[in-house]
Amino acid sequence: MEERRALLEKAKIAEEAGRWEDMVDFMKSVVKLGRELSVEERNLLANAYKNNVGAKRAAWRIIMSIEQNIEGANRRKDISREYRAKIEEELKVSCNEIIELIDKHLINTIDTENQIFYLKMKGDYYRYLAEFCRDTSNDYVFESAKIAYAEAYELCRENLSPGHPLRLGLTLNFSVFHYEILEAWETACDMVKESLAAGEDDLRNLTQSARNDTAVLLQLLQDNLKIWSVEMDSQNMSSKTPQ
């Protein structure tokens, strides 16, 4: 217990300092101690990996933009491509690491909400891998993300109210997976519309803290739906333009 408390305190300090690599290491050690994570511990683990991987994803997008804006074949483009490959390898290591932690230490829980949380995390990190695997034949990554999200989504529909923040957060990410990765635009929009209608109806049944989180997530879903609707309308207009 003393070791666990010390690791958690270090993780919290690392979080305050923005030392995400260190926070990841501390929370990995907590997970490997083998006890069910509390909600606070679960959130610390998620935050550690989200920020660590998020920084790498942001760097990857910048390098991709640089590479795409370099015309022709030259040394700068070659260097950018090599650097992108390095970042992609780091992303693979980090994403596969958290997926392995979930599979080995966390997913076999009797708590349904925890199970949904970890399945959502698996879907998220497979989705992050899918972001730079779209030009490859790595079907396993796409299918694994879809399976994890779908299993979590079904558990949500059976066990959580429509306005529950975890259910809405899952819907947000699963719909992004459909829209951005699978390019199943109609499916993504239908999923969001259904979630918005049910979630807004459920608001009055929630506690004040849950209501605040739910309101934020409902707004994010609404924002995505507006953006996607405009993009889809633009695509439809382009397809109707005479060639």
Image: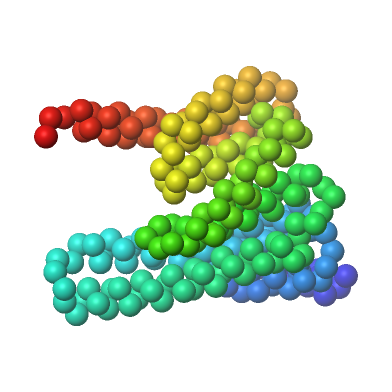
Whole-percent x, y for residue 166 in the image: 66, 41
- For the residue pair 20 and 80, the one nearer the viewer reads as 80
Quadrant occupied by the N terminus:
bottom right
47 left or right, relative to 158: left
At 25% from the left and 65% from the top, the residue drawn is: 66
Quadrant occupied by the C terminus:
top left
Q: Residue furthest right?
A: 1
11 left or right, relative to 187: right
- For the residue pair 52 and 239, the one nearer the viewer reads as 239
At 27% from the left and 78% from the top, the residue drawn is: 79
Whole-percent x, y for residue 46 in the image: 64, 57
Q: How is the image coloured?
A: rainbow
Residue 155 in view here = yes
At 62% from the left and 26% from the top, the residue drawn is: 199
Q: Quadrant of residue 23?
A: bottom right
10 left or right, relative to 49: right
Residue 58 in view here = no
